[in-house]
Image (cartoon, helix red, strand yellow):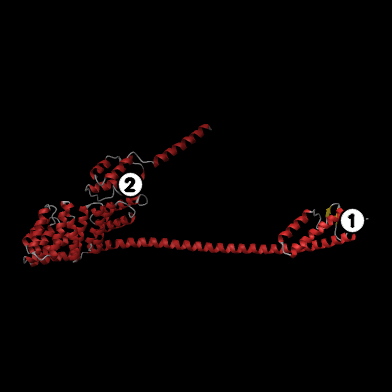
Amino acid sequence: MLMKLRTVIYSLLLATLCMLSCSRHSVHWGTLRQVEACIEAQPDSALAALQRIDVQELAGKEERAKYALLLSMALDKNYVDKTDFEVLQPAIDYYQGHGTATDKLRTYYYQGRIYQNQQKHDELAMQCFVKAVTEGTASDDILTKARVLFTQGRIYSTIYEWDKCIATYLEAAEYFKSMGRTSSYVNCIANVINAYTIIGDSVQAEKYIALAQENLDGCSAKIKAHFYSIHLTFLVAYGQDKNDIRTAINDYISISSTSATDWLSVANAHVKIGDTSAAMDALTRHGEVINTPQRLKYQALLSQIYKSAGNYKEAMDVYEHYVALTDSLEYARVKSDIQFVEEKHSLELKNVREKAKNDITILVAIIVVIIIFSMLIISRYRLRIKTAESELAKQEKERYMQLYAQMEQERDSLTELLEQNKELNQTAKNALLERIGLLNRFFLANITKDAKTSKEVDKERRLAGEQGGVHGLYTHGLCWQSPPFHQAS
């Protein structure tokens, strides 16, 4: 018996220790927290620290999710573009129903970045970014919010949603500015300038050109080159002086490295000033065309160069390729999918809100029904109490009237007894007189409606020694019975 008890106790202790050990983090949890704190400033060090951790030693889903998210962040910040979800998947699974707003914001953002790296799922990427904005509303991670908006702006530009493109870029710009990220801020403003140039709003474009120029000194060489490329495109669209455009071309090429130069913009500027040879040279130096917008721009410029050189057949052939590209079913499908991502998400949120509203309406209706039902019960209970009180009052009144008649009869009998028995001793007479006085006080109280005195008299009368009814009293050796009463001689 004792051995069995010990076995049970040891089993309970072992189970408790297992539960406690499962709920605690491993020795790597502190390292993960340190990496999270320095990953923005030192992404290379963060990646190295994470790669030294033995994944098998991580404890619990929360710890594995945190590691997966931080490793995905570190890889992205070190320009390692993942195209699969092998690393991030534990974070995706865990943070769907757990974690802080910041955890959810970052997970959806880097999930969307992976879709973008695949270069064929912009609509899925946009779904992730929309969820990141929604789920990360309460997060204080301003940089990730800015990056989400910036990436959304880039996707909007590929489907020519210029109003949304401008709005998201400007919102991202304010976030970057608040964090002191001047290069990122000017980068957003440059993209806004490009959008306004494309839709033909030169006034707004000039406004943001001036704003970018005010902050240009604090930017990296890469961002400066990007701004000059956008500015060159603006001058081509609205400038009249060929010398100004030529100067802008030279300034841009001098500040930009050869690998970073946007040769399509340079080619476009040469086409504008009629220098077809330089334009063709710029197209040749552009190298590989990597996305649909670039292919469109490339085909359009090539068609114009052939036309300016008098090669009309080549110009028409290239233009036909351009038209086929713009009308492609694949592009239309991608555009349609992305355009409706936000609408689908908004509809889902609307359905959730309507369901919550309906639930509240049903709850209120139930409460109202309960209140009405309770009021009916209370009213019925009060009616019963009132009816019972009325019945008791009626019974009390009947009892009182009966008592009144009995006491009236008793008084008359005692008065007659006193008158007919003159020989009674003084003690008996005093007792009779006292009793008659008590009864008279009762009648006086009844006449004057003095309920208090009436109750006191009734109490005194009962304390006098009631036995066998009102008339069966023995007081001071005198027997009182139902009248007429004659004492034996």
Could you say which is closer to the camera, residue 175 or residue 65? Answer: 175
Q: Amino acid at mark 2?
A: Ala
Which corner quadrant holds the C terminus? bottom right
Q: Residue at x 84, y 53 (%)?
A: 474
Quadrant in the rendering for residue 47: top left
Q: Position of residue 209 (x, y in %)?
A: 17, 60
Task: Report crowding for label 2: few under 14, some 14 to 19, many 20 or more residues within 10 A (C-alpha).
Answer: many
Residue in the picture at 32% in, 40% down: 30
| Image coords of residue 284 (percent x, y) | 9, 57
Asked if residue 332 lies left or right of residue 243, the reply is right
Q: Secondary structure at mark 2?
A: helix
Q: Nearer the viewer, residue 399 or 302?
A: 399
Residue 241 visible here: yes
Q: Quadrant of residue 307?
A: bottom left
Per the image, the residue denoted by label 2 is 65
**Image mark for residue 97:** none
- Badge 1 element: loop
Tell me, for residue 424, which label it has, or none.
1
